[in-house]
Image (cartoon, grey):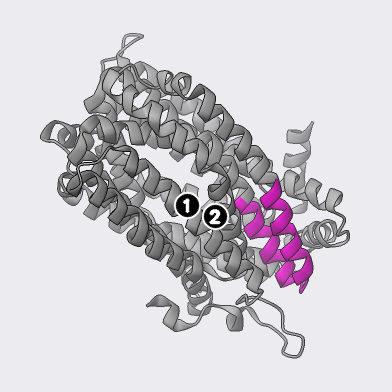
Amino acid sequence: MKMLRFFNWSKYVGNNADTFVSCRLRRTLSHMTASTGERSLTRIIWTLSWPIAGANLLMRGAGIVDTAMVGRLGGTALAAVGISQIITFAALVIIQGFAVGGQVMVAFHTGAANPHRSRAAAGAALSSSIAFSILAMLIMPRVTPFLARLMGASPAVTAEAVVYLEWIWIFIVFRSILVVITRLFQGYGDSRTPLWVTGGVTIIHVLIAYPLIFGVGGFDQWGVAGASFATGVSECAGVLVLWIIGVRRRIFELRIWRFSYTDFAEVWKTGLPTSGERLSMTSMQFVFARILNSVSQAAFAAFRVGVDIQAFSFLPGLGFANAATTLVGQNLGAKKQDIAKKSALVTLWMTSGYMAIMGLSYLFFGNYWFRAFTTDTAVLEHGYVFMKYAAAMQLPLAAAMVLSGALRGAGENRWVMYASVIFGWGVRLPLAFVATNILNGSIQWAWFSISLDWTIRGIWMYLRFRSDHWRLSPRPTIPIKPSDAMPPREAAT
């Protein structure tokens, strides 16, 4: 019945589309701002968060399934997929900035009940991301071997990574569009549609990947290439569905001939710090991967498997963080700073509760978690220890993620970027390098450096959030405009 009701909306989307969207925005805002009761706010946060969390899990789920299946091919294939994932993240750092910038501006204009500006911001984010993804498609295949060797990958791992990434680069435009459109829907206040579509994407991926990876059902065995090919085809299907829905509901308008520099500048200035943050995180992961590979290939493989296991914890946490971005952005657009702040704090408590439970499972059942992904003895030995540190970092990680999301919704992306640069490069990397390469210490020091990084980062986010000095904060005497609310030009430095 819900699906039927959803598709019946299309009869209202035509000549009266602006009226339909405006009414929907007002109805959404009325639910978000009419009541400040904690129980009501909790229900609103949960309603918005769980579809985002589910979509995050399903979107990353394809990669997690790939890790579990490829892990049966051996440690070399497992390390190659881990290297490839970091390289893919590097290729998408600019796209992530446009995605977050589009989400924040769509949420802001939604809160201001201005559907025209909301669609314009969405179109600017989409067109810009498509242009940059085409550049990535042309450039990244040429630099893939160099980047793999830069992370300390062996020749065998590098060769497997090149094979895996060949299909990823062919379909990179569709992955970029999927990332951006998902964020635009969430900024608009619709987190359920991406959930259902991403669920379909994951099902298609598994149905294609399994026979191609292992060569069953009459198919040739493609190995790691089968995983990446399945990823590209399934994401292409997801983009097609979300694009049709977004155009019919006029969530975005992609009209190059009506390109507005003002809309592009707002999206870019808002998302630029996020790109800086992702660039810092990705380059830090490059160096961290090299540190781990200098210890052993098994140590790096254990780290990548551990990250995929933690995805069951931090991806729902990121769903709550995205909800905080939307709620803070919309309520600040509606000049409801008190509700914006309260929604972020309630979201933090909800996220902390969930991630604390997951941390206990990592502490007491970490060995079972790891055995579900690999049977390699050396990888398992490192992984069991890693899971104990993963359990310890869950609460600081929850605080860092949720408050980062809240600060993004308030236009404070640059502070999130500062934290990534200062603590990733100033705490995690030096401690891990000195302990493992100079003092010849245990790999446990590398795991400890990750926990320390997130603990300090969570404190940093909390202090900035409590300051109330937000870029998009409504001023009592000066009417706020989105163009005035953007981070200043010097934020780019």
Observer-nearest of 358 and 479:
358
What residue do we see at 41% from left, 18% from top? 371
What residue do we see at 58% from left, 71% from top? 411
State left or right for residue 38 relative to residue 271. Answer: right
The location of residue 472, given as percent across then percent down, is 64, 75
The location of residue 478, given as percent across then percent down, is 72, 90
* Quadrant location, the N terminus: top right
SS under mark 2: helix
Q: Earlier in the sequence, mark 2 or mark 1?
A: 2
Q: CA distance from mark 2 to mark 1?
A: 7 Å
The location of residue 315, given as percent across then percent down, is 54, 41
- The answer to whether residue 247 is seen in the rendering is no
Identify the residue under disc 2. Answer: 400
Type of amino acid at the residue the image marks with label 1: Trp
Establish if 43 lies above or below 423. above
User: Which contiguous range is marked in magenta?
Assistant: 321-349
> Is 148 a magenta residue?
no
State left or right for residue 101 relative to residue 174. Answer: right
Establish if 175 lies above or below 429. above
Q: Residues within 10 Å of mark 2 (few under 14, many from 20)?
A: many
- Of all residues, the one furthest to the bottom in this rendering is 477
Observer-nearest of 75 and 389:
389
Identify the residue under disc 1. Answer: 454
Q: Residues within 10 Å of mark 1 (few under 14, many from 20)?
A: many
> Is 327 a magenta residue?
yes
